[in-house]
Image (tube, grey):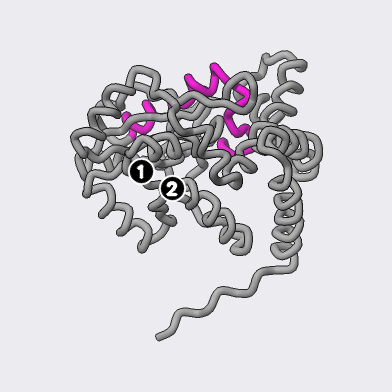
Amino acid sequence: MREPADPPPSLSDRLTNTVFRAVLALALALPYRTRVIAAGWLVSRLAAPLAGWRKRIRDNLALTFPGMPRSEVERLVRAVPDNVGRTMIELYSGEAFLDRARGLPLTGPGAAALEAAHRDGKPVILATGHFGNYDVARAALIARGFRVGALYRPMKNRLFNAHYVAAISRIGTPLFPRGKQGMAAMVKFLKSGGMLGLLMDQHMAHGAPLTFFGKTALTATSAADLALRYGAEVIPVYGIRGPDGLSFSIFVDAPIPPDTPDVMTQAINDSLERVARAHLDQWFWIHRRWK
């Protein structure tokens, strides 16, 4: 029996994709430095208000930092979308972005463990989040010869999803879409000694009720589940944007000790929270993390 065909893209999807592609083409025509700065400005000043991101950032900060001075809230309202805009255009910049990632040293208490796992061909779950540029660590590790794949969630707008996946594929492959087919390929890759990047900071309706910034946040335990099942290490990795807004450093946190899935996943949340607290403008406060 044939599966029903996907419905054609809606008019809204077509319009959104057309506008994005037009802005993207204009941005990519600019020199790299100019395009990254311009993309940050456009998203911060124009896209964020239209998308309702400013209100969402304020709401998230009111929940997690109720005593934060208004001046700092307003700084983050502008700075967070700026980082999002820079990240998006960087992901579409191909070789120019990869040039920024090549040769970046691995820093932090988990760097030696990550290097050792690479030398020994051991599987690793690279736990990370929507922070800084979340793909620069993957690019940097691939440039160093590491076998790194990533799990991604296909976007609802299929037109947008097609060129987004093509863009992040230029950074490196394999990429595994969420779902049965993607999961099977992902497990095979991990069992072969690959390193798998997982974004751990999205709301999951059936996730474990753990904490993030002191508030209950339903969190998938998939990283811990996979690690325990297939003997992989869990090592948090982050691409931190530099003060110039263009450069990066790769921070590798200490490996997560084996334990129950909930305990391990809470440790992942805590790792991301520590890094995000040190760079509040680099975590994606636009997310509906606490539903």
Question: Is 25 placed above or below 148 here?
Answer: below
Sequence-wise, the earlier of marks 1 and 2 is 1
Residue 76 appearing in the image: yes
- Residue in the image at 25% along x and 40% along y: 123
- Magenta part of the chain: 262-291
Which residue bears the numbered disc 2?
A: 172
Q: How many marks?
A: 2
Which residue bears the numbered disc 1?
A: 148
Q: Is residue 288 magenta?
A: yes
Give the image location of residue 133, x and y in percent: 55, 34
- Packing grade of label 1 (10 A; few <14, some 14-19, many >=20) is many
Marker disc for residue 133: none
Give the image location of residue 288, x and y in percent: 60, 40
Question: Which of 117 and 181 lies nearest the eye of the viewer?
Answer: 117
Q: Between marks 1 and 2, how big is the CA–CA gap?
A: 8 Å
Q: Is residue 41 magenta?
A: no
Q: Are marks 1 and 2 in contact (CB under 8 Å)?
A: yes
Question: Which of 260 and 92 lies nearest the eye of the viewer?
Answer: 92
Identify the secondary structure beneath mark 2.
loop
Q: Amino acid at mark 2?
A: Gly
Give the image location of residue 69, x and y in percent: 72, 13
